[in-house]
Image (spheres, helix red, strand yellow):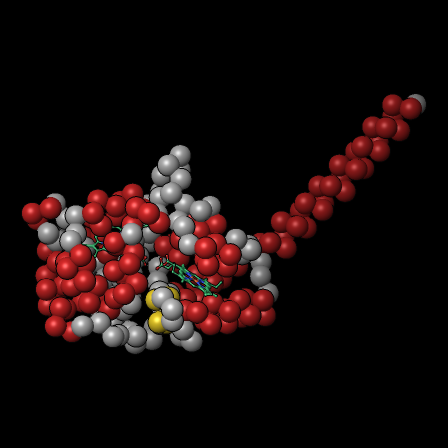
Amino acid sequence: MKRIILTSLSLAALVVIASAAASRAEESATVSPRDLDAKINYCKTCHGTNGQGFRGAYPMPRLAGQQTEYLENQLQAFIDRRRTNPVMFNVAHVLSPAMLKGLATHFKDLNPKPLGGAPRELANAGKKIYDEGVPETNVAPCSSCHGPEAKGEGAFPRLAGQLNDYVFNKLVNWSRERGQDKSKPDTSAIMEPIAHGLTEPQIKAVAAYLGSLE
Ligand code: HEC
Ligand code: HEC
């Protein structure tokens, strides 16, 4: 008798736990338009009112028109600390999976003009590197992965219109910031040898070209 009561009690407890878990899962599977809007406005205080990027104490990258898969990848990389950035860790680690998706979709659909500000005289040399790579150091054409118009695809990010100073910082510091969990190799490894194969003047040139692209 005692055992039967215990069993039915624990069964009841299991049902309660299971349904609580189910409703939690439901909660996190959607996000209200109001919560999404509030979060988008928060992102834009740093990334610019149209997601075009912003120059403050340091460059905040353009998010507008960025591939959703790349955006989600990077937010997850900040959360897992595979990509180090103290500001973006704090921003990203509170975001639910549904919020990540909602944010990525919103920014992908924006299309403002590039913020600009890159030295124009370097753009031609940059275009040559972008289209042809640097054969002497085995750097493949950027266009072969990022697309002929630098719009990206899937996990390959859009680079068109990205802030030139942001691009410069990322390429120079690649191995100090990305792929920081050696037990969990990620898409940053594809780009690593390319970043290492470029000299600083070459990076400046290709960054200037990308910063002007619509
Ligand atoms: C306090 C300022 C700040 C806020 C708020 C902020 N960001 Fe950022 N974000 C940054 C900075 C700075 C970087 C550049 C990090 C680096 O240099 O690696 C960045 C980088 C990113 C990147 C990587 C972009 C790339 O091209 O690799 C993504 C994605 C991103 N932020 C998304 C968001 C989203 C979505 C929000 C809102 C939920 C947000 N950020 C809010 C400052 C901010
Ligand atoms: C073999 C494919 C490949 C080639 C070639 C390539 N890239 Fe990449 N690139 C990638 C991938 C994949 C990523 C995303 C890395 C990640 O997920 O961290 C990336 C990321 C980047 C980023 C970071 C973007 C951001 O918003 O933070 C920059 C900048 C970049 N590439 C510039 C270049 C330039 C310039 C060239 C040519 C000199 C080039 N890439 C050639 C695959 C490639």
Position of 57 relative to 98 (above/below): below
Residue at 22 percent of width and 72 percent of height: 118
Residue at 25 percent of width and 72 percent of height: 214
| Drawn side of residue 184 relative to residue 123, left or right | right
**Residue 107 horizontal/vertical position (percent):** 41, 66
Foreground residue among 1 and 135: 135
Image quarter hosting the N terminus = top right
Foreground residue among 20 and 41: 41
> In this rendering, does residue 109 appear at all?
no
Residue at 62 percent of width and 49 percent of height: 25
Q: Residue furthest right?
A: 1
| Drawn side of residue 206 relative to residue 162, left or right | left
**Residue 43 horizontal/vertical position (percent):** 47, 67
Residue at 13 percent of width and 68 percent of height: 122
**Residue 188 horizontal/vertical position (percent):** 32, 46
> In this rendering, does residue 115 appear at all?
yes
Q: Residue furthest front?
A: 57
| Drawn side of residue 91 relative to residue 12, left or right | left
| Drawn side of residue 210 relative to residue 56, left or right | left
Q: Residue furthest left?
A: 136
Q: Quadrant of residue 120?
A: bottom left
